[in-house]
Image (cartoon, rainbow, N blue to C red):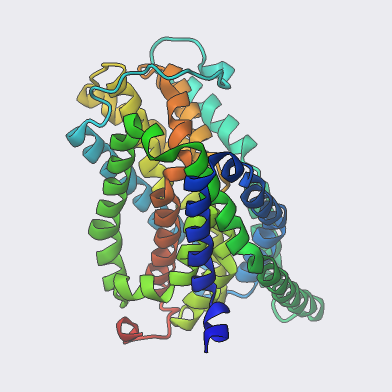
Amino acid sequence: MPLRLLRNPTLQLLMAIACGMLLGAVDPRLAVAMKPLSDGFIRIIGWLMPFMMFLLIASGVAGLQVRQRGLGCRVLIYFQTMALLSLSMGCLIAEALHPGNGVASSASTLSLPVIDAANTPGEFSWSAAGAVVSHALVQNPILPIMLAGLLAGALLARAEGHRHADALRTLLEKAVSLLFKVLKVILRFAPLAAFGAIAFTIGRFGPASALPLLKFVAVMYLASAAFVLLVLTPVAQTSGVSLWRLIVHLKDELLLVTFTGSSVAALPGLIEKMQTLGCDRQLTRLVLTTGYTFNLSGSNIYLITAALFLAQMAGIELTGSELLTLLLISLVTSLGSTSMAGSAFFTLIATLNLFHLVPLEGVGLLLGVERLMKCRVLTNVLGNCVACLAIARWQNAVAFVSARRT
């Protein structure tokens, strides 16, 4: 019985986290040296991500039934609605609580990349906006892969019934199955990565080092929780699943995401878990994989909250029209985000380069709490799972009725 418990992935992660916290408190210098364990894990997952995205999207589109061919428009509508709601939620809470008031920007600043088209101070212009958005999309490494997967899948779907197309579709399924097996082997090292990440966080920053920014962190968690409770909960309930039951169902994947910082690592498990809830297999693959770029609600909340935090820290009070402008800019620049670690931070830089009212000087402060933003990645993952349920229900591509009791 004890040996069986030790094989439990959740228990292994929790034990690794406890050991990492202990090491960070006892020997901070050694704990900081554990950082390569988590960095290496994330780097390996990053190498596999392009193949994973292409295969999952191509196989998902190729396998869609005729009644599901109008899926793209509904996915786009849902994703953009969630983006607007998450940005609005972060804006409202940051404006209500003012996390940047009374915070001194005494920390050292960093030299940060600036986009030339938006580097000249002045009024907001749509030409500058176009330059920033184009730059963000061009620099997005996932977008060309997603487009290639969509094109390949669409061509296979159009050639349905053709002998060679059917053979290619079968080959895609075998490739996906092989990739999942490889990822399962890699995920056995997730506790080691979690140990390294937690040890580094405690050893490098410690509880006291983040005190000036704890208010910002608290507001981020509050905004994320409000979005989950006020938006995701009713959407999940309408789709036929209690959000709490969904969280319990996905607990292993959510723990993996929390303590390794890699949402991509949890993707195979999330796809399997959503299928067990009754979601159509091809739709699940398509929605979850595209959602990793276009439905990042947690990253959106971070983007708008961080921008307002920096404005308040600099003593800048934004008017209603300026807040609306910031909201619209964030809605567009968020298209350049991905699920890669650090993507939300660089999207914030692109946004501030375009919205000249908020200075860039204080943005280096936020690097100190990047590893504390677990609510961001958890909201991203949970939002994509709820999106899968909602769109599956919308498409009538779901096979459950009483899943709230799952």
For residue 232, above or below residue 39 = below
Quick check: 310 left or right of 339? left
Q: Nearer the viewer, residue 51 or 169?
A: 51
Where, by quadrant of the figure, is residue 12 drawn? bottom right
Where, by quadrant of the figure, is residue 192 drawn? bottom right
For residue 339, above or below residue 209 = below
Q: Give the tally of numbered discs.
A: 0
Quick check: 184 left or right of 291? right
Q: Position of residue 384 (x, y in %)?
A: 44, 61
Residue at the right extreme of this rendering: 164
Q: Position of residue 138 (x, y in %)?
A: 63, 36
Q: Answer whether residue 71 is visible to the viewer in this image.
A: no
Q: Answer whether residue 185 is visible to the viewer in this image.
A: yes
Residue at the bottom extreme of this rendering: 1
Q: Nearer the viewer, residue 198 or 318?
A: 198
Q: Nearer the viewer, residue 121 or 67?
A: 121
Residue at the front extreme of this rendering: 26
Q: Residue at x 37, y 74 (%)?
A: 248
Q: Quadrant of the C terminus?
A: bottom left
For residue 336, above or below residue 20 = above
Q: Residue at x 67, y 46 (%)?
A: 36
